[in-house]
Image (cartoon, rainbow, N blue to C red):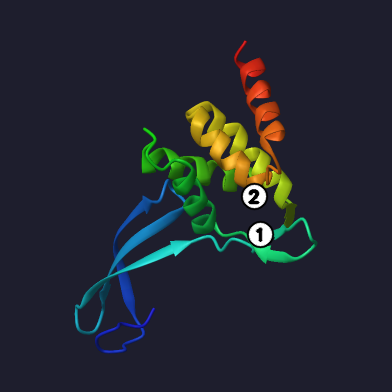
Amino acid sequence: MKCPACQHNGTRVIDSRPVDEARSIRRRRECESCAYRFTTFEKVEDLPLIVVKKEGTREEFNREKLLRGLIKACEKRPVSLEQLEKLTMDVEKEIRSCGFSEIQSEKVGEMVMDRLAAIDEVAYVRFASVYRQFKDINVFLDELKELIKKEE
């Protein structure tokens, strides 16, 4: 690895430790020529995960976009950002563990809603109303009835 200070092509690793739930490694390095110390990170390169939308278009899975939607659904609710980040990471981890490079957006939405219902029912209904595009109050009431059945 090249030294960022002197461009010498020789460095040695001083310290290594896992970071990001052991998904990457942080390395402290020192240049063999000028003794400059710097940090590098090493992680497995994930293959792009493609989400197939209802209308057939494809886009790359975006964890931040999903998190933003969850934050909106949980606005003014007692749900921490850490809970939402964990939910988002769990969904992505489950999708990647399936081994497919493409997944239907409906499947992603169902995975999110299953987890969100266990965290906060109001946030679940908010998310479901946007995700499922409730057309009228009857569809909304049907969803609430299903939620009540699950609790019994």
Splitting the image into 4 quarters, where does residue 25 fall? bottom left
Residue 73: image location, x then y, percent? 49, 43
Q: CA distance from mark 1 to mark 2?
A: 8 Å
Residue at image coords 54%, 39%: 126
- Residue 100, position as x, y percentages in the image: 74, 52
From the image, tell me which residue sits under label 2. 96
Vertical side of 29 occupied by 142: above or below: above
Q: Which mark is residue 49?
A: 1
Nearest the eye: 43 or 72 = 72
Q: Is residue 97 visible?
A: no
Q: Nearer the viewer, residue 108 or 20?
A: 108
Give x and y (percent) for residue 17: 34, 52
Q: In this orientation, which residue lies closer to the viewer: 96 or 127? A: 127
Q: Is residue 20 left or right of residue 5?
A: right
Kindly check if marks 1 and 2 are in contact, taking CB atoms under 8 A apart as contact: yes
Query: For the point 36% across and 83% down, which residue is it?
Result: 2
Seen in the image, is 11 located left or right of residue 83?
A: left
Can residue 111 be seen at all in this image of the molecule? yes
Q: Which mark is residue 24?
A: none
The answer to whether 147 is drawn above or below residue 113 in the figure is: above
Closer to the camera, 13 or 132?
132
- As drawn, which residue projects farthest toward the top? 152
User: How busy is the neighbourhood of tag 2: few (under 14 within 10 Å), some, or many (20 plus)?
Assistant: some
Name which residue lies at 79% across and 60% down.
55
Q: Residue at x 39, y 64 (%)?
A: 41
Mark 1: secondary structure: loop
Q: Amino acid at mark 1?
A: Leu
Q: Which residue extends farthest left?
A: 35
User: Residue 112: x and y, percent?
Assistant: 59, 40
